[in-house]
Image (cartoon, rainbow, N blue to C red):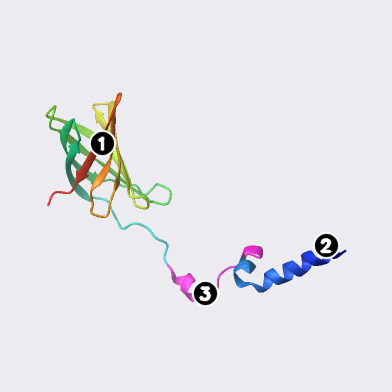
Amino acid sequence: MKVFFSFYMLMGFLMLMPGITSAITPQKSTSGLLKNSAVFKPAATVGLKLLLIGEIIGYSYIKISLQSTDNSKRYKNTAIAFEGTCYEAKTSKNYKIIGTFNTETRVWKLNCFDNSKHLSIFIGRENREGVIEGHWTCKKSILPFYLKKPN
């Protein structure tokens, strides 16, 4: 009987605390501030163009030109889809690139293709200065790279 009574005393005490009340009994917010707050969505990014220059350290200099594509069908729209070309100075060739930029984690993932054959992957994080640093993976080699916007 004491245990049963103590449980209801504890529940009554928890109901007095405002933060825990909503966790125990879910309620809809009636705050005017929360009613009018907008859900975060990235700005319209279709047609956004980027030019990035950099280096796969110890391998080649690269120049990447990207243009954003329509990604309105993606869940939550936290990633911006890009496609474009990558010029590699070592081979003097242009390659097709398809990738994404996650706006929450600031991570770039770019897949590089030669015709229909997958060649390499660039995965890097953009820092506050706008420089993308990460690793480039191609067949059996993994090398660091950096990309930045030209001045």
> What number is the disc on residue 107?
none
Disc 2 vs disc 3: which is toward the camera?
2
Q: Position of residue 90 (x, y in %)?
A: 13, 28
Amino acid type at image mark 2? Val
Circle 3: element type: loop
> Which quadrant, please, contains the N terminus?
bottom right
Residue 66 is a magenta residue? no
Q: Could you say which disc has been placed on residue 31 in the image?
A: 3
Secondary structure of residue under mark 2: helix
Q: Which residue is mark 1?
A: 144
- Separation of marks 1 and 2 at Cα, in angstroms: 62 Å
Q: Is residue 103 left or right of residue 65?
A: right
Crowding at mark 3 (Cα within 10 Å: few <14, some 14-19, many 20+): few
Give the structural element (helix, strand or loop) at label 1.
strand
Q: Residue at x 64, y 68 (%)?
A: 21
Q: Is residue 36 magenta?
A: yes
Q: Which residues are magenta?
A: 23-37
Amino acid residing under circle 1? Pro
Residue at which label 2 appears: 3
Q: Position of residue 150 (x, y in %)?
A: 13, 49
